[in-house]
Image (cartoon, rainbow, N blue to C red):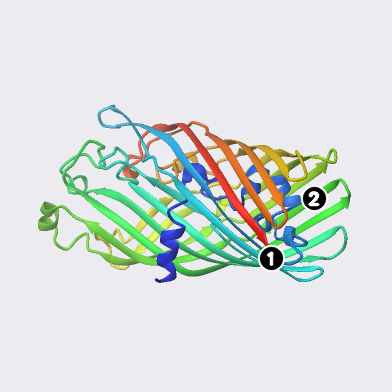
């Protein structure tokens, strides 16, 4: 099996826009990090915390440790719109299904102060699918975009109070974008992109993959006092160059009338994923209770446009597909606490406010979401060589109104009723 096929089957099943985070970033790289991100950045405890801060890998094991797990979610979001031609009101929602976001880590202490680790995870994910013939079909009917990241990381315990970690990320991705084209509207037989049903819609499917893109990570863990812990990390932008093809499902009357148009072709494009700045502080209030605060800056200004270039245009003068995005850099804030119930059991809880980078002037149905509020709860068990972590969170997605752009298949309306229930688990074993 080709690596790109493995990525598609193993990773792209999982990333849901309504359950990710800012834009379509994923912060679900580790179970304990979902429950309390501040502790995963500033303290550590599991090798999977390298997802947030590579410096937490220092001292994570005295031998070899393996960790595996997954995040599961089932998002829900309604989309409302109004026809600019008839004033008819529409409402629909994406197909309800479960998404999985797996992760795997292995680390080994190669010296008393050096730890080498490798993580396999997804940092970017986007997925949604709408019913056939829905009113926004001329903008999007399906999107499936997932990355598969392999990140070797080295962490050094420089002093008793300072650890430094750095890594390189090799990223593979698979992207699918589908939408309908109003062929009757283009031919002047009806109002262009009228959301009412049409038997002459052409279905367009774009599929692209990237052999390998690269980024890098850097982190620090600082313990200036026995009860005070600070974590800082940076994850670089990753620019991926996609190659693939565009396929068209053309109704017989359209194919007969325009035999030279809507031909399958190769295509290429470029996607620049954001950089992330993460910082956290954790205070040990008592021997059992720790309280923390985390802030993350996501550089979504890199997402200025979506462009896909066809080798052979489907219509004369239409060789470039895509739209303006003009997203914004955004902040993500969370506060959490963990409490050691017994020598084997620990509980955690957190609240996260996650801003949306979407520019409402360019809002569309590919990423139908807005600012989120996340309430998370976690429970960990550890005995001997084994550790098991579990987590549940409820995510509320705020309503968002936006103006229509009929030429792009987007109609005045709002995203509403958005929420998600999610859970995660992981198992760790030392050798």
Q: Which of the pair 370/101 is nearer the observer?
A: 101
Q: Secondary structure at mark 2?
A: strand
Q: Residue at x 32, y 40 (%)?
A: 136
Give left or right: position of 261 versus 53: left
Q: Residue at x 80, y 61 (%)?
A: 163
Give left or right: position of 192 versus 74: left
Q: Secondary structure at mark 1?
A: loop
Q: Earlier in the sequence, mark 1 or mark 2?
A: 2
Give the labeled residue for mark 1.
431
Give the labeled residue for mark 2.
230
Quadrant of the rendering where the C terminus is positioned: bottom right
Q: CA distance from mark 1 to mark 2?
A: 29 Å
- Where in the figure is residue 320, as x and y percent of width and height? 35, 59
Crowding at label 2, few (<14), some or many (≥20) Cα neighbours within 10 Å? many
- Where in the figure is residue 169, as x and y percent of width and height? 60, 66
Where 237 sits versus 187, above or below?
below
- Where in the figure is residue 302, as x and y percent of width and height? 55, 55
Q: Which of the pair 8/174 is nearer the observer?
A: 8
Q: Quadrant of residue 83?
A: top left
* Callout 1 touching callout 2 (CB < 8 Å): no
Q: Which of the pair 136/106 is nearer the observer?
A: 106
Quadrant of the rendering where the N terminus is positioned: bottom left
Q: Residue at x 31, y 61 (%)?
A: 319
Crowding at label 1, few (<14), some or many (≥20) Cα neighbours within 10 Å? few
């Amino acid at each position: 099996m080709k690596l790109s096929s493995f990525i598609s089957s193993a990773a792209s099943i999982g990333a849901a826009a309504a359950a990710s985070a800012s834009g379509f970033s994923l912060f679900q790289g580790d179970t304990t990090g979902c429950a309390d991100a501040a502790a995963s950045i500033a303290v550590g405890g599991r090798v999977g915390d390298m997802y947030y801060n590579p410096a937490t890998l220092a001292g994570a094991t005295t031998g070899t440790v393996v960790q595996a797990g997954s995040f599961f979610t089932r998002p829900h979001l309604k989309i409302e719109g109004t026809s600019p031609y008839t004033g008819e009101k529409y409402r629909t929602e994406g197909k309800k299904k479960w998404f999985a976001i797996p992760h795997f880590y292995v680390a080994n202490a190669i010296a008393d102060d050096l730890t080498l680790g490798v993580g396999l995870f997804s940092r970017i994910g986007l997925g949604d699918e709408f019913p056939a013939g829905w009113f926004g079909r001329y903008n999007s009917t399906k999107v499936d975009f997932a990355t598969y990241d392999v990140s070797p990381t080295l962490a050094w315990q420089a002093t008793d109070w300072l650890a430094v970690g750095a890594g390189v990320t090799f990223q593979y991705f698979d992207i699918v974008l589908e939408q309908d084209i109003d062929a009757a509207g283009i031919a002047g037989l009806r109002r262009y992109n009228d959301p009412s049903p049409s038997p002459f819609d052409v279905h367009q499917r774009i599929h692209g993959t990237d052999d390998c893109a690269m980024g890098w990570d850097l982190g620090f863990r600082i313990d200036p006092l026995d009860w005070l812990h600070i974590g800082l990390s940076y994850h670089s932008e990753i620019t991926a160059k996609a190659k693939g093809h565009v396929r068209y499902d053309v109704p017989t009357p359209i194919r007969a009338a325009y035999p030279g148009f809507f031909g399958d072709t190769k295509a290429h494009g470029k996607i620049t994923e954001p950089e992330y700045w993460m910082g956290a502080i954790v205070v040990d209030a008592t021997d059992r209770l720790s309280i923390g605060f985390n802030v993350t800056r996501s550089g979504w200004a890199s997402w200025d446009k979506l462009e896909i270039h066809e080798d052979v245009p489907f219509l004369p003068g239409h060789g470039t597909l895509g739209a303006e995005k003009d997203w914004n850099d955004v902040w993500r804030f969370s506060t959490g606490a963990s409490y050691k119930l017994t020598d084997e059991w620990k509980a955690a809880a957190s609240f996260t406010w996650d801003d949306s980078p979407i520019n409402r002037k360019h809002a569309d149905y590919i990423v139908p979401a807005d600012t989120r509020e996340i309430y998370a709860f976690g429970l960990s068990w550890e005995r001997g060589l084994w550790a098991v972590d579990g987590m549940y969170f409820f995510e509320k997605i705020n309503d968002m109104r936006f103006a229509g752009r009929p030429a792009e298949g987007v109609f005045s309306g709002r995203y509403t009723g958005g929420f998600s229930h999610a859970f995660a688990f992981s198992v760790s074993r030392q050798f």
